Image (cartoon, helix red, strand yellow):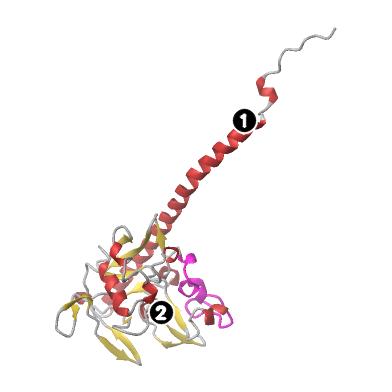
Amino acid sequence: MNAIRPNAPRSARGFTLIELLVVIAIIAILAGMLLPALAKAKERSLRVSCASNLKQVGVGVFMYAGDNDDKLPPNRVSATSGSLWYPYEVGRQTGQNWTQGPHNLGSLWATKVIPDGQTFYCPSSKRLPGEFRYDAYAKIGPWPLGADPADPLWTQLGVSSGNVRAGYFYLPQSLIKDVDAAGNPLPYARITLRRVSGVDYNFLRMAEVNAGKSMGTDLVYSSAPKSQPHRDGVAGLNGLFADGHVNYQSQRKVPQAWASPYNDWSALTPVGIRTIMDMWEP
């Protein structure tokens, strides 16, 4: 007669299929809750690193002015028509020789005020077009003259003319507003261009700059959400102000910069970009 064995302890039986499925479902729910939070934390970390870069740029501008009779780095810019992208230019080169510049933020590199070119690019730049990324100009040699002419980027993304572009927009704003033909003030700062070696520059001294307005920002490339340098639920970017502080500008905070007629930044004229730059809040 066989002896009756007592029931085996529950721990010896392992999990049932239903219990395993419940555990997997709980893990999936927790992952779904945690991953967005982790992504947001990573984005905020990149935004903080970006703000640090811009603060270094601000210090560099002050140092440059201190060494150059209060003059800011020469700002290549179009006043009313022409290229939107001039304020991004570090300079233009052919065969690793400068043909124009360095100017804009490139002046800080050329004078060794900021010797590391990576400071001029947002850490979130991997989502931006290649021509606004550091590695595009450090492929076959040191930045900024290390672009590879055989790289498709050199011809496909508009850098075939030898443009070397930073990832930050540089546009210091005068204390004086521009005016229309009737003398009425316009919603953007005056730009007075002077041509030097065939290039038009806006020259300003620190005393002429509006400290309450931005003088540099993340890439103002496109208002499309996927093209924004930073996203915290909505689009946004960091702005460097002329007193040296950096403040985050979001679509919630400055909705007019993303609303019509400014809802497609890449299609704006220089006047439109100047108007948006006047909107950022300190």
Residue type beneath disc 2: Val
Q: Name the disc covering residue 36, or none.
A: none
Q: Nearer the viewer, mark 1 or mark 2?
A: 1
Residue 180 position in % (x across, y down): 19, 82
Judge whether 251 appears above or below 35 on screen: below
Packing grade of label 1 (10 A; few <14, some 14-19, many >=20) is few
- Which residue is situated farthest in the bottom direction here? 197
Q: Residue at x 31, y 73 (%)?
A: 61
Residue 44 visible in rendering: yes
Q: Is residue 130 magenta?
A: yes
Q: Is residue 249 left or right of residue 9?
A: left
Residue 170 position in % (x across, y down): 33, 74
Residue 94 position in % (x across, y down): 49, 88
- Which residue is situated farthest in the left direction here? 183
Q: Would you name the residue on which mark 1 appears? A: 19
Q: Is residue 134 left or right of residue 12?
A: left
Q: Would you name the residue on which mark 2 appears? A: 90
Q: Residue at x 63, y 33 (%)?
A: 20
Residue 97 versus residue 30: which sits nearer the camera? 30
Residue 106 position in % (x across, y down): 39, 78
User: What is the quadrant of the N terminus in the image?
Assistant: top right
Judge whether 19 appears above or below 81 on screen: above
Mark 2 falls on what kind of element? strand
Q: Which residues are magenta?
A: 125-151
Residue 243 versus residue 259: which sits nearer the camera? 259
